[in-house]
Image: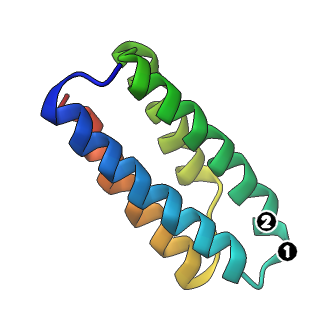
Amino acid sequence: MLLGMASELALSALDAYIAVLSASADHTRQAEDRSRYRDHLANAARLFHLLHCGEMKALKDLVSVEQRSYGTGFLSGDEGAGAEAAFKAFADFVAGL
């Protein structure tokens, strides 16, 4: 259950992140990045579920896990930079909830 306008905006930011991840996964030329994109897309599905259910603590915990992952699992090229920027926008929004 989505709760209020803040959740709707967070959902919109998450949707934008998923769209960038999907496009980046489709366009990357780095074979080793493909599994990383799959992992991030799987976690994005989990993020959607937690947001949808209003489980804010679990949502923020998973955002923290993903932040650490981006810090250690660099994604290559413009695709990676775009995915990281889209995630940062979502994470920053979640931090304000």
User: How far across and how far down the image is residue 48, in percent?
Assistant: 48, 35
Residue found at the far right of this picture:
31
Q: Mark 2 sits on what residue?
A: 34
> Marks 1/2: CA distance?
6 Å
Q: Are marks 1 and 2 in contact (CB under 8 Å)?
A: yes
User: How far across and how far down the image is residue 70, in percent?
Assistant: 55, 52
**Quarter of the image where the N terminus is located:** top left
Residue 47 appears left or right of 76: left
Q: Secondary structure at mark 2?
A: helix
Q: Callout 2: 10 Å neighbours few (<14), some, many (20+)? A: some
Which of the pair 90/18 is nearer the observer?
18
Residue 20 appears left or right of 42: left
Which of the pair 95/12 is nearer the observer?
12
Residue 58 appears left or right of 5: right
Q: Which amino acid is tagged 2?
A: Arg
Residue 70 appears left or right of 52: right
Tell me if residue 37 comes above or below residue 23 in the rendering: above
Q: Residue at x 59, y 45 (%)?
A: 69
Which of the pair 3/39 is nearer the observer?
3
State the scheme by which the image is colored.
rainbow
How many numbered discs, if any?
2
Q: Residue at x 41, y 26 (%)?
A: 52
Q: Residue at x 50, y 33 (%)?
A: 47
Q: Mark 1 sits on what residue?
A: 31
